[in-house]
Image (cartoon, helix red, strand yellow):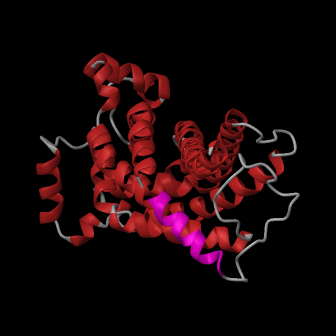
Amino acid sequence: MILGGLSGLATTIALQPFDLLKTRIQQREPGDIVRARNTRSIIGTAKDILATKGVRGLWRGTNAGLIRNVPGIALYMTSLNHIRSLLATSPYFSVIRTPSSYTSTHASVLPSLTVTGNLLAGATTRVAIGFLLNPVSVLKTRYESNMYSYASLSSAFLSMVRSGPSELLRGFVASSLRDAPYAGIFVVSYEAIKQNATVLLPPNSTMSSALLHSLSAASAGTVATLTTHPFDVIKTKVQVRTEDRYHGLARTVKTIFQQRGLLGFFDGASLRLSRKVLSSAIGWAVYESVLLFMKRQPELKSERT
């Protein structure tokens, strides 16, 4: 849990500008009046923020992001590990490691599951954590947007609470449709890529192990992000826009398609992809590397004695 929290802290602070720019790109629709034409592009939007708010403007929403991501990633990684360990006790989901698979002590200490087991573990864990922290996700998205003028996090949250439960759970359906397949696809892809990559990059040292986990996580993050990005666009629209045409999943999908066509569902995809690839590579490399280090300590101690 501590490792997951530290991962969330590092990735949130380092990668917040990606989230901010993605939200600004996704929140717009053709009828909006913007200060300058080029603010519809990523570079133009970044320049506009720098011109009006300075460098600190790119980190707007960081506090809300920390409240969301530090406990969120900590709970996700811890819960995922426990659920995978639980499923590994079942013959329907467990995979018995053979001598030819992961022969090195530097490979992995995580439970090995079937594809179905990995999908179930990833999707269930992600949706459950997403439900608990959805109010903070709404708060984070609105803070990143420039459509709300909240004075503080506490006043913003109180304003949402006064609006009722529907406001606190706004966008949860779209988030679940994004997160469940994302987490499932990521875990399945991560394990498959990691296992196959050991042929080209044997994890026979701490450095090669960290590189293996980083590349596997980055590749899995790419696959999962591109597959689920349309629901991220829908989620942002639902949480930020107040017009009736954005109330409800089906109505929002119809509105986006009418305004922008299929391309509208991939607004901000490059920003989310960059953010997910970097955060996945950093987070999982740290997580697995330290777990391996902790596992090997008793072995090293016994060797010394």
Q: Nearer the viewer, residue 192 or 57?
A: 192
Q: Quadrant of the N terminus?
A: bottom left
Q: Quadrant of residue 60?
A: top left
Query: At which x and y percent is residue 91?
Result: 73, 83
At horizontal 49% and vertical 50% (from top left) the residue drawn is 259
Instruction: Please indicate, yes or no, whether residue 231 appears anywhere in the rendered image.
Output: yes
Q: Is residue 119 left or right of residue 133?
A: right
Query: At which x and y percent is residue 84?
Result: 59, 69
Q: Main secondary structure of the magenta part?
A: helix
* Start-end of magenta stretch: 76-89
Q: Nearer the viewer, residue 259 or 164?
A: 164
Q: Is residue 58 left or right of residue 4?
A: left
Magenta-drawn stretch contains 181: no
Q: Residue furthest bottom?
A: 91
Number of callouts? 0
Q: Quadrant of residue 51?
A: top left
Q: Is residue 9 left or right of residue 264?
A: left
Query: At which x and y percent is residue 71?
Result: 35, 54
Q: Residue furthest front?
A: 305
- Rendered position, 98 above or below 196: below
At horizontal 31% and vertical 38% (from top left) the residue drawn is 62
At horizontal 39% and vertical 45% (from top left) the residue drawn is 27
Q: Nearer the viewer, residue 215 or 53?
A: 215
Q: Is residue 154 left or right of residue 235?
A: left
Instruction: Please indicate, yes or no, whether residue 28 appears anywhere in the rendered image.
Output: no
At horizontal 17% and vertical 55% (from top left) the residue drawn is 157
Q: Nearer the viewer, residue 149 or 247?
A: 149
Query: At which x and y percent is residue 83?
Result: 54, 72
